[in-house]
Amino acid sequence: MSRRDVSAPTARRQQKTGPRVRRRMTAVAVVLALASLGLVARAFDLQVVRKQFYQSQGDARFLREVPIAVSRGTIFDRNGEPLAVSTPVVSIWANPSEVLENEDRIPELGRALGIAPDQLKQYLLQRADREFVYLRRLLSPDAAQTVLDLGVPGVAGQREYRRFYPSGEVTSHILGFTNIEDHGQEGLELAFDDWLAGKPGAKRVIKDRQGHIVEDVEQVRAPQPGRNLTLSIDRRIQFLAYNELKNMIERSESDSGSVVILDVKTGEVLAMANWPTYNPNALHSSSVSDRRNRAMTDLFEPGSTVKPILMTAALSSGKYTPTSPLIDTNGGHWFYYGHDIHDTHNWGVLTPTGVLTKSSNVGAAHIAVQLDTDLMYNTYRAFGFGNSTNSGFPGEASGHMKIGRDWRPLEKAILGYGYGLNVTPLQLANAYATIGDNGIMHSPTFVKGVDGEAKQIVAPEVAQQVVKMMITVTQPGGTAAPYAWIANYTVAAKTGTAHKASAGGYSKNSYSAAFAGLVPASNPQLVGIVVIDNPKKGSYYGGLVSGPVFARVMDGALRLLNIPPDNIGRWYAGGPLQGNNGLVGNKPPDAPNIEEAPVEDATP
């Protein structure tokens, strides 16, 4: 075959395969173009059309909104000393499912947390469907860091704040406490919770799979720290009141007691102490009874401490003056509507001032029955008996007093010496402060510089006369002498000893021992109330049990506040029984030693 004949078929085959290659190349190019177009479309769909959806999905896996903890406002005393502060702490939390994936790490985690491993595992299993559970709250930063340094997957820390009270049990009943979420639960922490709490902020962060923050993205809400609060309380006087009250209760083996100190001119509460008490830094060791602010919540019959209020009504009536008319208490007994109203001694004939000086129940009852019922009732009500003091303190009791039109003759008589009504120590303190401030009543306040409501409820001259009458109680021969004496200061006061009510009547062996006084009497600046419940050892009389507490607390308070003395060089022992032109009345029979016999009547 010739060479020409061999090459001819080859040329024909090349002519046939050329178009097929081009078609294949075209097909491949079309496929690649369509694939590229699909990728572009998919990218457009992911990045434009459904961007928000996928962004949210990604955020859900790594982006978190976490709170920004804020510090609760600090509570200060009137001199700027901190009474309640917030300290930074760390709470340990976990994602249960992540921790359970590393089950071999649970024992060491439990040891670091102080939790039994089996208990911790069970706790996590029961909450495996959650992403967030607390393991331990409010740890110190060092203790929390020890846990976090273990590097257990799914365990992280969250910064918070914990309340701390530097004065502990001394101011606990005033301040109250906060719960684990740092919200006020009792006392002023509760009353001013909105003011103190502030508002937590929020921020978005990126977290890794172990819950650690790796990047702050943005602040969602700015935190608003709590505002500070300055109280009227003077921590120095508060310590004095607390220590003296505690010492007397322990010495007399009493059940409980309260001390209240007010600024007469403003109604500011300078001190309020109770016993028993509790440590707000260790709530678990206290009972509900320990946490009760007895000065605000506990009611008692004021006994003879109500007699200055009775004298205010008597002087306001125009029927009585400090020296007249004379009141016959001879025999020391008055049988009235079948009830034996009696004194501990036969005081003879007394002036109205003498009724206070000797704390004569017979004399007080005689005065009460002679007064117009509406006048006496309205006077008691005006002094706050049966009403809240509007102090704003949570749980404050309003006391109880029967409506005047329902008083029977005997009820009216015994109301004259402090039975048949119930008051709180704060109510009684505020009533005495009203007498001390020339008849002007202020609403008690726990906040420094707050001008509470003030109103004139009795004539200034009446209030001034009552103060002068009360001075005789602390002079020689009075029921508070010498136990309530304060060197270089005159004291206007009244003692009170009342049988405690019990089922079916009054207990024969259980008493409330009270003392109420104003200092310095020439220009009262401070009022103090001491109430001691059921003293069992030694005397149970208000002058002997509560009077010394009053004297020691006020002695320190007067000096701390730089209140000048009003009796320098005029105070001496063994002064006359009758002073101020015979205000006390006629000379009584010789009385036994004050430590051996009672000088005031506690019988209802």
Image (spheres, rainbow, N blue to C red):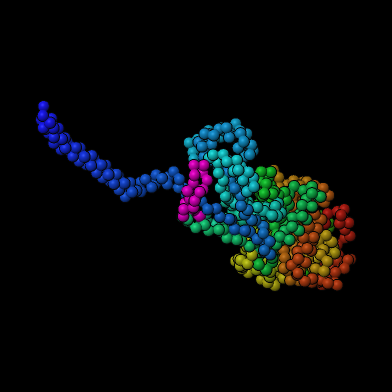
Q: Nearer the viewer, residue 359 or 238?
A: 238
Tell me if 84 is positioned left or right of 476 in this view.
Answer: left
Residue at the image point whose x is 74% and y is 57% from the top: 239
Q: Position of residue 343 (x, y in %)?
A: 80, 55
Q: Which residues are magenta?
A: 201-218
Q: Position of residue 315 (x, y in %)?
A: 70, 68
User: What predominant SS class does the magenta segment belong to?
Assistant: strand
Residue at the image point whose x is 56% and y is 35% from the top: 123
Q: Is residue 216 magenta?
A: yes
Q: Nearer the viewer, residue 458 or 428?
A: 428
Q: Is residue 409 magenta?
A: no
Residue at the image point whose x is 66% and y is 71% from the top: 459
Residue at the image point whose x is 68% and y is 64% from the top: 79
Position of 56 relative to 563 (above/below): above
Position of 463 relative to 516 (above/below): below
Q: Position of residue 113 (x, y in %)?
A: 62, 39
Tell me if 43 is positioned left or right of 105 in this view.
Answer: left
Q: Is residue 563 visible?
A: yes
Q: Nearer the viewer, residue 380 or 105?
A: 105
Q: Position of residue 508 (x, y in %)?
A: 77, 46
Q: Is residue 409 visible?
A: no
In which image quadrant can residue 308 be found? bottom right
Tell me if 489 is positioned left or right of 218 in this view.
Answer: right
